[in-house]
Each structure stands twice: as C-alpha cells, then as structure tokens.
Image: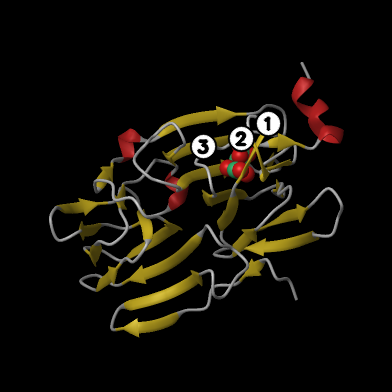
C-alpha cells in the first residue's frame, strides 16, 4: 500500500461537519506542511485555536463566513465546483489565533497549515488577488491560480496554489523537485496535492521519485485523493477525456519556491 496516497475518509466530528482528510506531522512524515479538507453543511460551523502554526483557509467550493474574533469576512467563496475554473477567496490567519468558519451554503474548505512563530495580520485573499498564469505548450498545458505565492509576504512559510491540467496533458512536468536547502539553486519545500477530476470518475497518474530512486512510487489518483510529496520529483499525467485540478500546499525552512528540473527531461522546455 502506498505511503504517499491518501483516500478520502469522512469522519463526522459534529452535526454537519465532516473531516475528509487530515495530514499532520503525527500521521505523516511531513514536518512543514499540514492540511485538512472539511465538508460543511449549510449553517454548520468549524472552530479552531491555532497553536504555533499559521493557517490559510481556502473556500474551495460553496460560500462561508470566516472570523478570527476580530474581523469577519462574510459570504466568501466564488464557485460551486472547482471546474468553473475561476479563482476563489481564502483567509490567512496567523499562529496563536482562533478562527471560526460557518457555512452559508454546502461548502468544502481546505485548511493549509505550517509551523509559525511570528504573528502576522489576518488577511482576506480575495479571488481577484490571485495571479493567473497559463503555463506550458503542446501536451504540457496548465492554468495556475496563485493564492499565496512566494512574492506575497502575507505568510511566514505557507505557499498555496491551484493548478488545472488539460485533458491528455502533463503538469509538474518536466519533472521538478525542491528537496534541497541549496539556494539560489533549489529550496527545500514539502508539498501536498489535493486532487479532483472532471468528470469525477476520472483518474490521473502521479509519480514521486528521488534521484537515487530510494523513493519511487507511481500512484493512480482518484477524485478527492491527497498525495504527499516529502521529497523528489512529482509529475502528474492526465488521461484523454479528463480534466485535472489540484491544490498544492508547500512549506519549508525558507519561503522560496526554487525548483530543480530533472536534467534528463529538461529538453521538453527547449522545444520550439
Ligand atoms: O506548473 C505546474 O505544472 C504546477 C506545479 O509547478 C506544481 O504547483 C508544483 O509541483 C509545485 O512545486
């Protein structure tokens, strides 16, 4: 059984609140990245007291209200399905604060965590604040919504991004890694992938492998699955007929996304 692939496992913790995924430093090998995927029925509430970790609350689908006890952000969230392919709203909350989320409509939220010591202001990251990128050509085309890129100083460690890969295309490709603290050449960042497919019965393949192949897993990933990337290259291949969406959370000792392409496959980028 794969150590890196997590299937949705819905646990109802209170009426209308279902934890779909929970990745922590206790139940995984990750030290810098944690995540929760939470489903909320209309009117249901989820509250958390953060310790020494920061959190980015992504309104993946549906509408929610979010408060950190000082500010309230009402009716945030922009889409019913991620495949509407429009950016959504998120809220950054710093360590040692409390936050509460209330669902206005049926909602799925993703809570992205990383260890953090220094308090920063709570921030509403509006959908229109996301920078949008179209990357790649031929069968390497993808659409990116940058929620918390390294150019945005709102967080201490967290980097959060959404990626759409077209049918029959590849992403995180040519294969790249960021598992060495060796700037300016490469940064060390752990990563998680939360995947969805359209139509939902689709699947993608994701390979996670290191140069020495001490880690080398190729996974069949289905709708709602999470893949952990503690180290190594992590390309995604999408079959014909299906579109892929994933949300990446990255964090490490330095908040810089500097990746290293696998030299054998870098020529992909040189094509005219
Ligand atoms: O551009 C892409 O294909 C997306 C990836 O860069 C993805 O966000 C990732 O692997 C980050 O390290």
Q: Residue at x 78, y 59 (%)?
A: 218
- State the residue position of label 3: 144
Which of discs 3 and 2 lies nearer the camera? The answer is 2
Q: Residues within 10 Å of mark 2 (few under 14, many from 20)?
A: many
Query: Which quadrant of the figure contains the C terminus?
Result: top right
Disc nearer the start of the sequence (1/3): 3
Q: Is residue 118 above or below residue 144?
A: below
Q: For the residues labelled 1 and 2, say whether their Cβ atoms are less than 8 Å apart.
A: yes
Q: Is residue 165 visible?
A: no
Q: Residue 164: x and y, percent?
A: 55, 43
Q: Is mark 1 within 8 Å of ligand 1?
A: no
Q: Is mark 3 within 8 Å of ligand 1?
A: yes
Q: Residue at x 52, y 58 (%)?
A: 33
- State the residue position of label 1: 185
Disc nearer the start of the sequence (1/2): 1
Q: Quadrant of residue 203?
A: bottom right
Which of discs 1 and 2 lies nearer the camera? The answer is 1
Separation of residues labelled 1 and 3 (CA atoms): 23 Å
- State the residue position of label 2: 258
Q: Residue 69: x and y, percent?
A: 14, 61
């Amino acid at each position: 059984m794969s150590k890196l692939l997590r299937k949705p496992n819905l646990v109802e913790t209170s009426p209308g609140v279902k934890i779909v995924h929970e990745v922590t430093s206790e139940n995984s090998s990750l030290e810098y990245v944690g995540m929760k995927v939470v489903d909320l029925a209309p009117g249901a509430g989820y509250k958390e007291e953060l310790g020494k970790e920061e959190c980015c609350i992504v309104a993946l689908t549906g509408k929610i209200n979010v408060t950190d006890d000082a500010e309230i952000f009402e009716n945030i969230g922009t889409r019913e399905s991620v495949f509407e392919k429009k950016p959504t709203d998120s809220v950054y909350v710093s360590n040692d604060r409390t936050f509460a989320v209330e669902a206005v409509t049926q909602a799925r939220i993703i809570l992205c965590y990383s260890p953090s010591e220094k308090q920063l202001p709570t921030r509403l990251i509006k959908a229109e604040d996301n920078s949008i990128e179209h990357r790649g050509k031929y069968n390497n085309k993808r659409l990116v919504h940058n929620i918390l890129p390294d150019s945005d100083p709102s967080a201490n460690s967290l980097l959060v991004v959404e990626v759409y890969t077209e049918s029959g295309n590849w992403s995180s490709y040519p294969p790249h890694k960021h598992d060495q603290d060796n700037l300016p050449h490469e940064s060390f960042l752990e990563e998680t992938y939360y995947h969805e497919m359209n139509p939902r019965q689709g699947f993608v393949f994701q390979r996670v492998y290191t140069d020495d192949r001490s880690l080398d897993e190729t996974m069949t990933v289905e709708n709602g699955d999470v893949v952990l990337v503690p180290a190594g290259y992590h390309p995604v291949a999408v079959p014909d007929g299906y579109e892929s969406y994933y949300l990446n959370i990255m964090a490490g000792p330095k908040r810089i996304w500097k990746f290293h392409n696998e030299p054998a496959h870098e020529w992909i980028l040189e094509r005219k």
